[in-house]
Image (cartoon, helix red, strand yellow):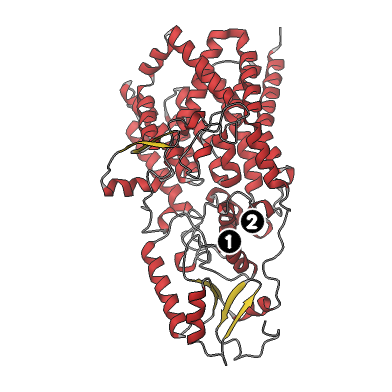
Amino acid sequence: MTSPTGRVWIGRLGLLIACLIGVIPVLLMFGPGVVLPSHVGWILGNPLSDDPGAHLLGWHYFRTTPFEWPPSRNSAYGLELGSSIFYSDSIPLLALGLKAIGAGPLVEQYWGAWLIATSMLQAAVAWAVTGLATRDVVARAALAGLAAWQPILIWRMAIHPSLAGQFLICAALLLYFRGRTGRGHAIGWCLLLFLSSLVHSYLLVMVGAIWFADWLRRLEQRRPPGLVEEAVAAFGSTLLGLWLAGFFVLTDGHVSGGYGDWSLDLAAFFDGGTWSAFLPDLPDNGEFEVAASYLGLGTLGLLAIGFAVGLRTGCLRRAMREHGPLLRIFLLLALFAITHRVFLAGREIIALPLPALIEEGFGMLRASNRMVWPLVYASIFAAGFAVIRRAGRLAGPMLAALLALQVADVAPGILERRQAFAGVPPTLPAVAQNPFWPEAATRYTRLRAVPTAVLAPGWLRTARLASELNLPTDAVYIARVDVRAWDTLRDRTEEAIRTGRHEPGTLYILRTPEIRQLAEAAMDPQRDLLAEVDGFTVLAPGWFVTPAAAPAP
């Protein structure tokens, strides 16, 4: 018989193994160098998306400028369009913390360390959840591994690193399934909501939904003492976190439309896409995240076994009675994910009309397919619990076999990303190569791209140029924009180009031939420089007024 001390050490070893299983996808895709703060090539040269470049550039401007008010405001990244690090998805939790301790100038990127940490936390929290049902080390490590080897998690690592913080969802389920009450339980929820608000808005909504289900369950069970106070504290901690993250810096533009464009296909869980070694790539509607909801064959097998066990033993009916509020919340989240435009294997089978106001409001969470994640993780844990209780000592080997099947099945998706990132160097060559740029950086105080646009073609290269010159810029990509400020800025900058009355201290990058023609017609060639420099069309007002240290390009 194993002594208590031996069991503790075996448990710690199991937890370590679970964390190592969880971190393997990150190391396979990016390599261990991803954790180094100076390795920014995989972000700026990301072969899959420009989104990580926006996250990094938001952090660059935030770390190199003084604190504003509120602390997360980031005016240099976007100028009049700028808002806060919340809207550049720069993980405010880390950005604020690093800047507060003075580490901003030293840390060029923290997304690699974030991915390492979150993958291990995903497995660690899943280990804790599984511990509610068993002390079997193999079963716990295997189920934790299944929770970590999910395409809904791994897909986001390369494109939306902040959304790799799905351990927050698992932590919410841990608080729920523990079934505790009292002040400590309420404090746990408030802390989790606060942290979620400092990571990503979608994760906050999911965690908030699970908290509300837990709150309703306790209310239905006639355990009301402290529930009102907890609700006030939960909302208060959420609002505090959102304020600190910079959510309220943007006063207009939260409602952006697009609800229904990123809906959850009814066949998405079974669509192997480029992920699966065994299941086929099903037809889809071409939506950007359509391949990100596949569950993996090991998970599908677990859910099938768990469902069969639940029906046979009656525990499914008991769970539906005991967890009614949670199931109702999951149903609402699933319906929201599917949206009013219902797709099956890429075919739109139902299109229901929605009032314009509701459709625009739901557009705040336009990537609606993500809202099914809490249901996915809760189903994994519930099916795992059913297998553990039914199979006894065989549960560990069964779950380990399902984990092995999951790893074998989703390996093609991971290897595809490994190959995509294999050719990306640790750092990229500077965009600013011509000696014109250092001189320009001393003469101008901002860089504008005309016409004003968010996510314009070539925006990342222009934003990189501005960051290398340490010039605030409106050549940015941010998640939400004040449309009225955008329209005003666009009209004002185009008017300046059209009339030749240029904004003092502004260096212009002209994005289109039409804007170049307007600039050439209105400029004073004796004062202003219009030239092609390193692939950019540059208008430098007043360039010839002061003798340049470097010759004009």
- Whether residues under marks 1 and 2 lie with C-beta atoms below 8 angstroms apart, the answer is yes
Question: Picture coordinates of residue 338 (x, y %)?
Answer: 39, 35
Q: Residue at x 48, y 75 (%)?
A: 514
**From this viewpoint, is residue 215 visible?**
no
Q: Amino acid at mark 1?
A: Leu
Count of residue discs: 2
Question: Picture coordinates of residue 520 (x, y %)?
Answer: 52, 84
Q: Residue at x 64, y 75 (%)?
A: 533
- Look at mark 1 in the image and give the residue it sits on: 460
**From this viewpoint, is residue 401 visible?**
yes
Q: Residue at x 65, y 18 (%)?
A: 400
Question: Picture coordinates of residue 13 (x, y %)?
Answer: 71, 23
Q: Amino acid at mark 2?
A: Leu
Q: Quadrant of residue 153?
A: top right
Q: Secondary structure at mark 2?
A: helix
Q: Residues within 10 Å of mark 1 (few under 14, many from 20)?
A: many
- Look at mark 2 in the image and give the residue it sits on: 44
Residue 200 as seen in the image, left or right of residue 12: left
Question: Picture coordinates of residue 491 (x, y %)?
Answer: 40, 74
Residue 302 versus residue 435 in the image, above or below: above
